[in-house]
Amino acid sequence: MSSEQFSIGTKCVQAGYRPGNGEPRQIPIIQSTTFKYDTSEDMGKLFDLEASGYFYTRLQNPTNDYVAAKIAALEGGTAGMLTSSGQAANFFALFNICQCGDHIVSSSSIYGGTFNLISVTMARMGITTTFVSPDCTEEELEAAFQDNTKAVFGETIANPALTVLDIEKFAKAAHKHGVPLIVDNTFPTPVNCRPIEWGADIVTHSTTKYMDGHGAGVGGAIVDSGKFDWMAHADKFPGLTQPDESYHGITYAEKFGLGGAFITKATAQLMRDFGSIQSPQNAFLLNLGLESLHVRMPRHVENGQACAEFLQQHPKVKYVNYPGLPGNPYYEIAQKYMPNGGCGVVSFELEGGRPAAEAFMKELRLAAIETHVADARTCCLNPATSTHRQMNDEQLAAAGVPAGMIRLSCGLEDKKDLIADLSNALDAIG
Ligand SMILES: *Cc1c(COP(=O)(O)O)cnc(C)c1O
């Protein structure tokens, strides 16, 4: 199915898997570690990347590929892959083009797990990162680049700071320096924003969140726009533009072209060596979530907007962060990139800081305390004591996550009940 042909809602339901005559209507779960061939020669062609096909689920599985093709269609990309988690997706997206001695420019306003991945774990691998504010000027952004910079990274709507990335500004700077922009589009999902349309080259997801949407399976995805010309910057990306000796001297950018090189390399090298693949069972569950993504996202936005408006006028609430509120510093930019709204996640601080936040959260009946967001069921969290525990106060401030902040993820319940729950808990804390 051509990715251009249908609207986003139709793609959510039908893209990726087109059964032939008499084949299963629903995506089959190919619960098999391996695949059978008639001759060693047939299998050899797969190992040489001379033919496409499956041989071992550590690298690739048909169920996953149907679902990855759907996500690629939703994002308007040329190829996609599923990973075992969002963490694996961001690691693979970066490590596919960065090696020891390389450098990344990243927005400082990103998910705590990603911050730790690049600032600690990837730094140990010899890959360094310069963090810039998402609100930096073009000059400040420019100054962050080095000769060894290989990628620019940011989140469309950052978890949990809810800053909005100026995708065009970051894409322009990345392209000026001959490197791709990688955007983690977990929060808006392609239903509300498609970063490739604004210049992003690679899009990543924690499918654990809205895409699955029911808290059923941890997973990730990477989509390649097929637009970044690796060969035009061949010296920067030897992994894509020079022969891979582990595949008899194949050069990915030559053999698989703009549309296929990035994902083929990530599959053939990173999945082979790290094996962080999503289980076919989880891919099946993810697809069930995707089939209703376009129906669920507007409801998450509606509930997020209603809760944000309620909290904003409440005397016990110090401030509310929600890009859909007029007056929010990201309101205009959110309108530009996400005219139908962003997501159902709202963050706010109560008068009384961390102790008030803890007391309030204890009183909530519908909103459960969970290390999760973007679920059908409303949940909440104090990032400083959980997801962002590894950050000091200075880093928390830079990431826009003060210690007393509460992150509220509005689910799919009736908004009247959600507001009543918030109101009762605010009353109860005296
Ligand atoms: C949750 C999240 C991740 C990490 O995803 P996991 O599936 O938990 O590994 C990455 N980026 C963003 C924006 C997230 O919200």
Image (spheres, rainbow, N blue to C red):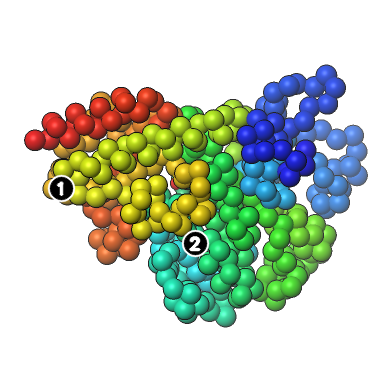
The residue that mark 2 highlights is 166
Percent position (x, y) of residue 257? 79, 59
Q: What kind of residue is marked 1?
A: Glu
Between 426 and 374, the residue placed more toward the observer is 426
The residue that mark 1 highlights is 351
Q: What kind of residue is marked 2?
A: Asp
Between 137 and 99, the residue placed more toward the observer is 137
- Callout 1 secondary element: loop
The 10 Å Cα crowd at callout 1, few under 14, some 14 to 19, many 20 or more, is some
**Farthest top residue in view:** 22
Q: CA distance from mark 1 to mark 2?
A: 31 Å
Percent position (x, y) of residue 301? 44, 38
The 10 Å Cα crowd at callout 2, few under 14, some 14 to 19, many 20 or more, is many
Percent position (x, y) of residue 423? 21, 31
Looking at the image, residue 184 lies above or below residue 241: above
Instruction: Tell me if residue 65 can be seen.
Output: no
Looking at the image, residue 236 lies above or below residue 91: below
Q: Is 222 on the left or on the right of 427, as rendered?
A: right
Between 269 and 306, the residue placed more toward the observer is 306
N-term mark: 1 or 2:
2
Percent position (x, y) of residue 198? 60, 58
Residue at image location 35% in from the left, 48% down from the top:
325
